[in-house]
Image (cartoon, helix red, strand yellow):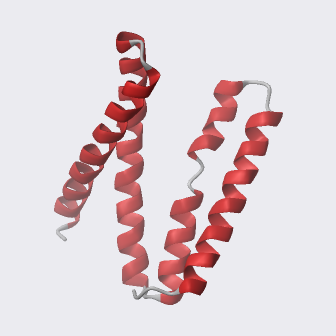
Amino acid sequence: MKFNFGDLALRFAFGGTAVAACHIMLQIIPSKSFAGIFAAFPAVMAAAVIMAGHFGTSEQASDVALGASAGMMGCTICVFTAVFCMEHLKSWSLSIIIALIVWFFSSYAAIRLIQGLLGK
């Protein structure tokens, strides 16, 4: 896929609207633990797959979805890492930095694992 400003603007609109809607849900729902599920809303994934399929091919959309799945697996490990580090390091900022690094490497490992299982 080549760069297209209209594509970028549409992604920004989809993503921004979803993020704003999720923020509103976080404010409205009294149980913040339950409301937290909206913080993980896959708006970026949906927008990316839609745009890849619309402006590219189904194969490109499939590849984006595979990467998003791996990223979501990495996100689960990221959250567990963040909670563990916050409880033990007592520093939320350092914990987030460590968790994001763990997210990147665990997501990469998940991509390799999924590709291996699919024979890609």
Q: Nearer the viewer, residue 18 or 116?
A: 18
The image position of residue 50, as x and y in percent, is: 55, 76
Residue sitting at x 35%, y 27%: 81
The quadrant the C terminus occupies is bottom left
Is residue 29 left or right of 68 when viewed as pictured? right
Residue sitting at x 62%, y 77%: 9
> In this orientation, does residue 7 appear?
yes
> In this orientation, does residue 80 appear?
no
> Quarter-wise, where is residue 102 in the image?
top left
Residue sitting at x 61%, y 42%: 39
Q: From what the image shows, is residue 98 above or below residue 62?
A: above
The image position of residue 92, as x and y in percent, is: 46, 22
The image position of residue 95, as x and y in percent, is: 38, 26
Is residue 117 left or right of 102 when viewed as pictured? left
Q: Nearer the viewer, residue 97 or 11?
A: 97
Q: Nearer the viewer, residue 85 or 43?
A: 85
Residue sitting at x 57%, y 69%: 47
Is residue 40 left or right of 102 when viewed as pictured? right
The image position of residue 35, as x and y in percent, is: 69, 33
The quadrant the N terminus occupies is bottom left
In this view, the residue farthest toward the right is: 28
Q: From what the image shows, is residue 17 above or below residue 5?
A: above
